[in-house]
Image: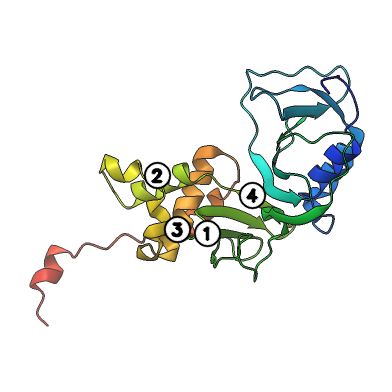
Amino acid sequence: MKQFPRKLSESELNLLLLLLPDNKPGFSNYRKLLNEYYLIGEGRFGNGNYFLGNPGDEIDLEISSSPVLTSGIIYTDKATFEISINEIQNNKIEFSILPYPDENENYNIKKVITLSDWVPGKKSPEGNKVKLFPIDGMNYILVIAPVDHRLWLYEKSTGINYPIPVSNFYNELLRLKKETRNEVYRNPNKLFEDLDSFDESEIILSFILYCKYKRRFNFDYLIDRFLPVPKKKKSLFSIFRRK
């Protein structure tokens, strides 16, 4: 029903809340806002893509969408839903649900596959092995799931797993490796195929440089720790010095 503004229906709200577990503190404000906000209009991607906000808020479709906060697939007795929720931006939350639920329908949940539930020690949401790369040694871990072709940043203090786009990160890794072949840049999935060929320090430094470029997370203070130590040149005297 395209009536704006209006509160989310029970079926809409319940599906969205399944991707925001209440045992993760980083999602508590989003859960609160989903209950308080109103559906205020459609997004740029048409049916199934909407914005939540306060009545009277205007949607500016000229502004790029904020990064995806979380996503998942929800299996029910009547339909399988693909859902994504974006990070809050300008006091509004963009989300997508495909297919869109009938507000008068009750859906019995059979299975939920989402990145939101992941914590260190678990396999990927799809049940495959992951590799962990500690960024700061305390709060942040970069996680790569080679079989699933996915990577995300785990934040211990909030419990949030931030999805990381593959292409831009892989480009930083290739630049660090001084790769010049265009055909390699055009195939970001080679990251997962060749993952074992990269050192842990190269993966971490590339991610830090990616964050510096994208300005999403601030790890600038760690750059010097992971930069390769330049080799000292031998002096002319040391070359001819007798042993």
- The residue at which mark 2 appears reads as 171
Amino acid at the residue labelled 2: Asn
The tag earlier along the polypeptide, 2 or 1, is 1
Using the image, tell me which numbered label, if any, was put on residue 203. Answer: 3
Question: Depth-wise, is mark 2 or mark 1 nearer the camera?
Answer: 1
Left or right of 110, for residue 153: left
For the C terminus, the image quarter is: bottom left
The tag earlier along the polypeptide, 2 or 3, is 2
107 shown above or below 234: above
Amino acid at the residue labelled 3: Ile
Question: Depth-wise, is mark 3 or mark 4 nearer the camera?
Answer: 4
The tag earlier along the polypeptide, 1 or 3, is 1
**Considering the numbered disc 1 on the image, is that residue within a helix, a strand or a loop?**
strand
Q: Are marks 3 and 4 in contact (CB under 8 Å)?
A: no
- The residue at which mark 4 appears reads as 162
Residue 121 position in % (x across, y down):
64, 71
Amino acid at the residue labelled 1: Ile
Using the image, tell me which numbered label, if any, was put on residue 229. Answer: none
Q: Give the distance between the C-alpha atoms of the residues marked 2 and 1, in whole angstroms.
A: 16 Å
For the N terminus, the image quarter is: top right
Picture residue at 78% right of the left edge, 56% below the top: 110
The tag earlier along the polypeptide, 3 or 4, is 4
239 shown above or below 90: below
Q: Give the distance between the C-alpha atoms of the residues marked 2 and 4, in whole angstroms.
A: 19 Å
- The residue at which mark 1 appears reads as 144
Q: Are marks 1 and 3 in contact (CB under 8 Å)?
A: yes
Q: Is residue 175 visible?
A: yes
